[in-house]
Amino acid sequence: MIHPLLLFLAIFVIAPLVELYVLIEVGAHIGAFSTIALSVFTAVLGGWLVRLQGFVVLHRVRGAMVCGEVPALEVLEGAMLLLTGLALLLPGFITDTVGFVLLIPPLRRALILWYLGRNGTLRPGPPSQGPSVSGGFIEGDFRRDD
C-alpha cells in the first residue's frame, strides 16, 4: 500500500512538474501558440466526449433501475467519467492522454472491476439461478383482472 504522503507528493508536486516539462518541450518544438491551441483543443474535445459518454452511462443507470437492479458499476463509471473530465480539462498532455485512455468504456469498466476485486469489495458468488422451479411447476398466485 502506498503511503498517503507519497501519494499526495506524487499528485500535487511531481505530476505538475512533469506536465510543465512536457509542455515546455512541446512548446519548444511546435511553438507556444500551437501548444496552447492544442491544449485548448484537447480540453474541448475531451469535455464533449465525456458529456456524450456521461449520457450513455446515465441511460444505463436508468435502464438498470427500471429493471429493479442496483446500478453500482454504472455509478462508479459515472464517478470515473467525472475524474476523466477533470483530467482532460487540466492543461497538459500527460493528463490528456490518461483522460482519453479512460474514455474507452471496456477499459474503464475493467479498471473498476480490477480495483473492486483488488480491494476485496467484489467477491465472486454463485450465479443467479432465477426463480425456483421444482417438479416442473412454478409456485405463485394468479389473478385475472378483466
Image (cartoon, helix red, strand yellow):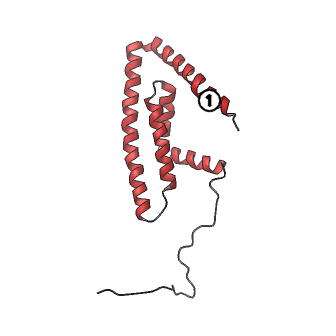
Quadrant of the image containing the C terminus: bottom left
Residue 71 image position (x, y, % from top left): 48, 57
Residue 102 image position (x, y, % from top left): 50, 39
Residue 63 visible in this rendered orientation of the protein: yes
Taking the image as shown, residue 86 lies to the left or right of residue 123, namely: left
Name the residue located 64 percent from the left edge and 31 percent from the top edge.
Answer: 7
Toward the viewer: 24 or 13? 13
Q: How many labels, in total? A: 1
Helix, strand or loop at mark 1: helix
31 shown above or below 39? above
91 shown above or below 66? above
Residue 103 visible in this rendered orientation of the protein: no
Q: Which residue is mark 1?
A: 8
Name the residue located 42 percent from the left edge and 14 percent from the top edge.
Answer: 30
Toward the viewer: 86 or 32? 86
Amino acid at pointer 1: Phe
Q: Quadrant of residue 64?
A: bottom left
Residue 134 image position (x, y, % from top left): 57, 85
Residue 127 image position (x, y, % from top left): 59, 67
Q: Quadrant of residue 16?
A: top right
Quadrant of the image containing the N terminus: top right
Looking at this view, name the residue that lies furthest to the front.
Answer: 5
Instruction: Classify 10 Å Cα crowding around label 1: few (below 14), some (14-19), many (20 and above).
Output: few
Name the residue located 37 percent from the left edge and 26 percent from the top edge.
Answer: 41
Name the residue located 57 percent from the left edge and 69 percent from the top edge.
Answer: 128
Toward the viewer: 49 or 58? 58
